[in-house]
Image: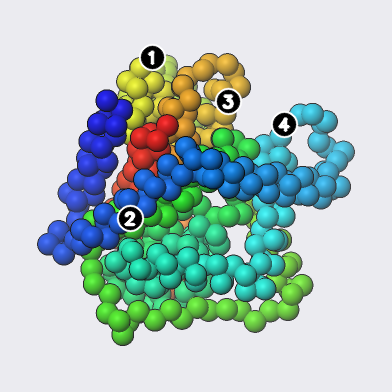
Amino acid sequence: MKILIGIVSVLIILLMAYAVSYDRKHIKIKPLVWLLSLQLIFAYAMLNSNIGQVIINGIVAGFDKLLKFAGVGIHFVFGGIINDNSFSFFFNVLMPIVFISALIGILQYWKVLNWIIRAIGFLLSKVNGMGKLESYNAVGSAILGQSEVFISLKKQIPHLSQQRLYTICTAAMSTVSAAIIAAYMQLIEPRFVVCAVVLNLFGSFIIASLINPYEVNAADDVLDIEEEQQSFFEMLGEYILDGFKIAVIVAAMLMGFIALIDMVNAIFTSLFGISFQHFLGYLFAPLAFLVGIPWHDAVGAGTIMATKVITNEFVAMQELKSSLQSGANLFDERSLGIVSVFLVSFANFGSIGIICGTIKALDVRQGNVVARFGFRLLYGASLVSFLSATVVGLML
């Protein structure tokens, strides 16, 4: 029954993308079959095979080591403020981003990341039915981040068609940057973070291919990457400061969003006898059921899913973590995995502004184009998250 419901759910999600397609006649079936097959294979390998478990455990152990190194620097600066054996979201979750960002800068300076991004992007371009630029962008977004990857493509942004622009923006909103993966791993189970990153990479092409099918001319498929010429320490200082800015920005957004949610919840409760989040939970419950959550857990899961879309993934992850720490036991292991995978992406209203603002800074005209399809962009990226969550539900 689980498999049957999962297959039906995948078909419904694909139909939801098909329903808003720009050009249904030119949808390519073969790349879709390849990409969906790869999603299923990778999901099974990561969650159910011994080799997959060994690889994921190795990745998690590596991030644990990095967090310990980051902790040394954090304790040196904030040691007098941090209470021993206590958990602080800002110090434990956000501050390690500074160290991870510095490592990413070093690897990029040494061309290691560029080689990895190009290599994986080249392989993806062989199965996704799209161009080198789209493939590079998807992998680059998952490593560098949704803003940084656009900067590396700033020479090509002004010349992209609306179709290609939609695809690269969908991929950017569907992925997460490597700098904050360690932060996610402290809020939800690490293996689901790794799984989501991989599945979203394929899922973004599946959904974009349905909503936004097009042909890429070989003459236009030229990858021209902008690389800044900086000294090593100039680069290192820039990435360290960028990491700190990300941490502070996330902290500010969390303070604002959580306070606003609490206020709106209080108003809704006084007027209607139900919190705003719980109200959203009922609206999202059918979608939670669609991706494999049992109906008795659907409202709770829908509440967290809606929180992620309306605010951001950190707020939703913190809500999930708090519910688990309180002993509420809202979900069984399978439901917890499905919800966790859904949360790992930048698919929320705030990301529309970030992507539009970044592209507008590079080219005003193209930024306005992105703003016009902003809601369709969020719709597509959200479907990517629903698809990845459904695939995981099939494997758990």
Amino acid type of the residue tagged 4 in the rendering: Phe
Q: Residues within 10 Å of mark 1 (few under 14, many from 20)?
A: few
Disc 4 target residue: 87
| Residue 173 in the image, given as x and y percentages of width and height | 42, 54
| Residue 63 in the image, given as x and y percentages of width and height | 67, 47
Disc 1 target residue: 273
In this view of the protein, can residue 215 be seen by the observer?
yes
Q: Are marks 2 and 3 in contact (CB under 8 Å)?
A: no
**Split into 4 quadrants, where in the image is the C terminus?**
top left
**Is 21 or 48 nearer to us in this picture?**
48
Amino acid type of the residue tagged 3 in the rendering: Ser
Q: Residue at x 85, y 41 (%)?
A: 79
Query: Distance between the Cα atoms at labels 3 and 4?
Result: 12 Å
**Is 338 or 363 nearer to us in this picture?**
338
Disc 2 target residue: 35
Disc 3 target residue: 322
Measured along the vertical axis of the image, is residue 31 above or below residue 60? below
